Amino acid sequence: MSTAPQAIAELRARPRRTVLAVPGSSVKMIGKARELGVDEVFLDLEDAVAGPAKEEARQNVVDALHEGGFAAPTVVVRVNAWDTEYTVRDVTEVVGRAGAHLDALLLPKVRTADEVVALDLVLTQVEKAAGLPVGHIGIEPQIEDALGLTNIDAIATASPRVLTLVFGPADFMASIGMRTLTVGEQPEGYTPGDAYHHVLMTILVAARAHGIQAIDGPYLKVRDEEGFRRAAGRTAALGYDGKWVLHPAQVDAGNEVFSPRQEEFDKAEGILAAYAHSTSVEGGARGAVMYGDEMLDEASRKMALVVSARGRAAGMTVSETAGEDR
Ligand code: GLV
Ligand code: MG
């Protein structure tokens, strides 16, 4: 059996181009979610579930985990935040009864590192009591307010279980008093630039500083595919690993936007091959080489590796016509 660090390293490396949110209160939606070709699915016990439906949702989620059958290779549950009366029971019930079928817990509204530490401690006890290997279930903290953003480095490093940092735009916008009701779009009246740039970049930089993934949150106008593509395209361009999807209509677009384009992938693979040859003794041991009309060096190789790794994770292969235009 793999050790906890190996299990967590494997979970961290998985693709998360699309992360599907599914209300734990809806057996029907959980059923539909099984078929969708997303990279990660999370069954929600938090804000998509009304207070009176919380208990039933927990039961649905435990049943759904036992039943399995999700096309998504990574299955997660979003527990309630620490300022509710639900968190400990969410963990006890879900992990205690179905932890063997679960990859991680998504922890919403994380404001301080202590909240991640607390979840790690509870998880460890529940894993031990349930006879599960200790430390194999990951934590995905969601950053949803100003304090969480301020404490982001401490949150990212609070537990070895942390896999990602996830932006929660709706709660974040509410918490800072941004004047808009449309999640994923720019607030009216803010014309220059992107109102989310600072937040998105802070999360991304912290994630990269600590070797974990950065995931963008939801785009709520689920029938506006063009709007979704625009919003997803912005965070994909920054370097985010993926984004939430709320509806089947967003799935293909999300997987496409967060995978490299074929010509980008071909170019990255071409750069890696050309650079490997040129830096080898047989290739002349040169550190700077021309590739088409571009001068490449070690930093270019690192950039190409990022695109290549994402493409390979998405199952891409080099096209037959690659390199013909050089
Ligand atoms: C998601 O939880 C959000 O608040 O956007
Ligand atoms: Mg939220």
Image: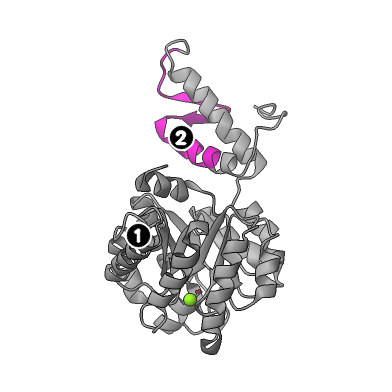
Disc 2 residue crowd, few under 14, some 14–19, many 20+, Cα 10 Å: some
**Looking at numbered disc 2 in the image, what kind of residue is underneath it?**
Ser
Frontmost residue, 274 versus 23: 23
Q: Please name the residue that numbered disc 1 is placed on.
A: 128
Which residue lies at the image location 40% right of the left edge and 49% below the top edge? 8
Residues rendered magenta in the picture: 284-309
Residue 136 lies in the magenta-colored region: no
Q: Please name the residue that numbered disc 2 is placed on.
A: 300
Q: Quadrant of residue 279?
A: top left
Does residue 231 appear in this view? no
- Label 1 within 8 A of ligand 1 by Cβ: no
SS class, disc 2: helix
The span from disc 2 to disc 1 (Cα, nearest Å) is 46 Å
- Classify the position of the N terminus by image quarter: top left
SS class, disc 1: helix
> What percent of the width, then of the height, locates residue 305?
49, 36
Q: Quadrant of residue 325?
A: top right
